[in-house]
Image: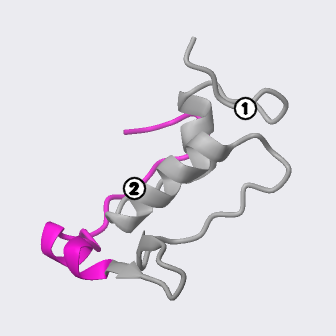
Amino acid sequence: MTTKSSTYKEKSPTASTKEVKKNVKKDEEGFTYIDGIPMVDQGQKGYCVVATAGRIVRYYGLDMTQHDFAQLASSDSKNGTHIE
């Protein structure tokens, strides 16, 4: 798959179903999370949706960034991502 900005490379999966289950953690305040999902700094952009999508696919081994998703979803820094 090629986006306008870059080409993503498929890596070997970093998380299988079994690994995801073992990565589910609960912190001392009782919050549940999946350990190992990479953090993405969206900066001052309204990229909440595309940054989250980028984090998920990187966890599963695809090398796509929030910027790749922003182009695919027609997101912009002023208005973010919209369904329309």
Query: At numbered mark 1, what does the secondary structure look like: helix, strand or loop?
Result: loop
x and y, in percent, of residue 60 in the image: 32, 63
Q: Position of residue 44 (x, y in %)?
A: 86, 50
Magenta segment's dominant SS is: loop
Residue type marked 1: Gly
> Residues in magenta?
1-23
Disc 2 or 1, which lies upstream in sequence? 2
Is 3 a magenta residue? yes
Q: Which residue is mark 2?
A: 57
Q: Quadrant of the N terminus?
A: top left
Depicted 75 relative to depicted 35: above or below: above
| In this picture, residue 15 sits left or right of residue 56 | left
Tell me where residue 4 appears, x and y as whole percent.
Answer: 58, 33
Report, in whole angstroms, how far the alpha carbon at label 2 lies from the one at label 1.
Answer: 19 Å
Dot 2, crowdedness within 10 Å: few (<14), some or many (≥20)? some
Tell me the tag on residue 80.
1
Q: Residue 59 magenta-drawn? A: no
Q: In screen coordinates, is 69 left or right of 81?
A: left
Question: What residue do we see at 16% from left, 67% from top?
Answer: 17
